[in-house]
Each structure stands twice: as C-alpha cells, then as structure tokens.
Amino acid sequence: MSEVPYTPPGGPPQKPINRELFKILGEERIRRMLSLFYANLSDTAIRHYFPKDPEGLEAAAQRSADFFIQIMGGPAF
C-alpha cells in the first residue's frame, strides 16, 4: 500500500523571494561561498557523489551558485 502525500489545492504555499540576503552577499560572495563549500567536500562521507577532478568540482560549485543566486533574487541563469 503506497500513500500519496497530501497536496493542498493550488500546490504548496509559495512565499515571495526575500532579496535581502542577495543584496547583502552579492553574486561574488555567493560564488566564493559555494566554491569553498564544494572544495571541503573531499573531507566528507558524501564525496563520491561529486566530480572527482578539480575542474568538474568547481563547475558543479558554479552551477549550484547559479541556482542560489537566482532563487535569492539575483539574475536568472
């Protein structure tokens, strides 16, 4: 028996984007933060889920940064 999760009519509630964090950090700092985070993955148990080569890891970090910048109210990528 599988249960279907309840979804309210109209879908899950959506809140407007709070652009304050993007204004405070800016694109450059967000990118740096994600690069540092991904660089530290080599010391974690989940390292095998990410690219092994430094260039691939940095590319993954930048794709994540694109996502976070966009959802924080920055430019669309």
Image: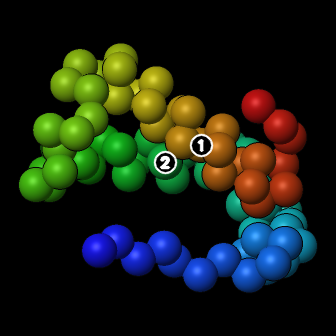
Q: Is residue 77 above or below residue 44?
A: above
Direction from residue 22 to residue 34 in the image, left or right: left
Q: In the drawing, what numbered circle is on residue 22? A: none
| Mark 1 lies on residue | 65
User: What secondary structure is found at the residue carrying circle 2?
Assistant: helix
Answer yes or no: is residue 20 visible: no
Q: How is the image coloured?
A: rainbow
Direction from residue 51 to residue 38 in the image, left or right: right
Q: Quadrant of residue 72?
A: bottom right
- Amino acid at circle 2: Leu
**Measured from the top left, where is residue 29 in percent x and y?**
64, 51
For the image, the number of numbered tags is: 2
Direction from residue 35 to residue 67 in the image, left or right: right
Answer yes or no: is residue 39 visible: yes
Residue at 17% over, 51% down: 46
**Measured from the top left, where is residue 68 in percent x and y?**
65, 51
**Measured from the top left, where is residue 65 in percent x and y?**
59, 43
Residue at the farthest front position: 1
- Amino acid at circle 1: Ala
Q: Quadrant of residue 7?
A: bottom right
User: What secondary structure is found at the residue carrying circle 1?
Assistant: helix
**Measured from the top left, where is residue 4 in percent x and y?**
48, 73
Do the numbered discs 2 and 1 sit on residues whose CB atoms are within 8 Å?
yes
Cα distance between the residues tagged 2 and 1: 6 Å
Judging depth in this view, the residue of 14 and 7 nearest the camera is 7
Q: Is residue 32 above or below residue 54?
A: below
| Mark 2 lies on residue | 34
Residue at 34% over, 29% down: 57
Where the N terminus falls, by quadrant?
A: bottom left
